[in-house]
Image (tube, rainbow, N blue to C red):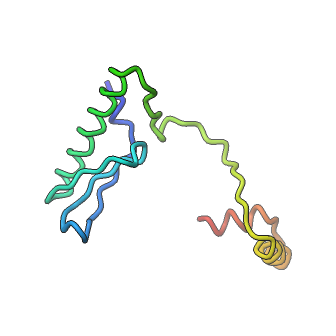
């Protein structure tokens, strides 16, 4: 059985300032774990997230939903300056595609 904290989004990266690997969890942006190896950093952040979930549960607080299990519509609104909107509309027209298709291709 997959534990709830195993569904979270983890990342390990190098911290030049600390001269160690840092484990991060997207659903808990305030948490991090430093270690000498990436494997230990991942293990540490997973354990920290697990402890955080247990503490939240014990305090009857809301537990963040894992990003991996959320449903996304594929739509989101982005506000840009009017000049940027105009420039993108011109690029789309000159390319013979919709503004949506042009912007989507730029996000890939």
Q: Quadrant of the C terminus?
A: bottom right
Residue 57: image x %, image y %? 36, 22
Residue farthest toward the left in the current orientation of the protein: 36
Q: Classify residue 75 as left or right of residue 93.
A: left
In the drawing, does residue 61 fall left or right of residue 43? right
- Observer-nearest of 89 and 98: 89
The x, y position of residue 70, in whole percent, is 54, 36
Say whether residue 9 is left or right of residue 80. Answer: left
Q: Is residue 62 shown above or below 17?
A: above
Give the vertical position of 108 relative to 90 (above or below). Answer: above
Query: Residue 67: horizontal and vertical position, in percent?
Result: 48, 41
Q: Nearer the viewer, residue 24 or 101?
A: 24
Name the residue located 45 percent from the left edge and 34 percent from the top edge. 64
The residue depicted at 26 percent of the width and 32 percent of the height is 51
Q: Examine the rendered structure and indicate whether residue 31 appears above or below residue 88.
A: above
Figure quadrant of residue 9: top left
Quadrant housing residue 12: bottom left
Q: Looking at the figure, which quarter contains the N terminus?
A: top left
Which residue appears at 21% of the width and 57% of the height? Answer: 38
How many numbered marks are there?
0
Which residue is located at x 81 percent, y 71 percent? 82
Q: Is residue 43 left or right of residue 85?
A: left
Residue furthest to the front in view is 59
């Amino acid at each position: 059985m997959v534990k709830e904290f195993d569904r979270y989004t983890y990342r390990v990266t190098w911290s030049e300032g600390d001269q160690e690997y840092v484990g991060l969890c997207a659903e808990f942006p305030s948490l991090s774990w430093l270690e000498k190896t990436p494997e230990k950093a991942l293990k540490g952040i997973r354990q920290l997230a697990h402890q955080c979930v247990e503490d939240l549960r014990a305090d009857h607080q809301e537990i963040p939903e894992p990003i991996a299990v959320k449903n996304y519509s594929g739509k989101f609104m982005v506000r840009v300056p009017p000049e940027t909107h105009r420039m993108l509309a011109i690029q789309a027209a000159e390319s013979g595609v919709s503004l949506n298709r042009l912007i989507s291709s730029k996000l890939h």
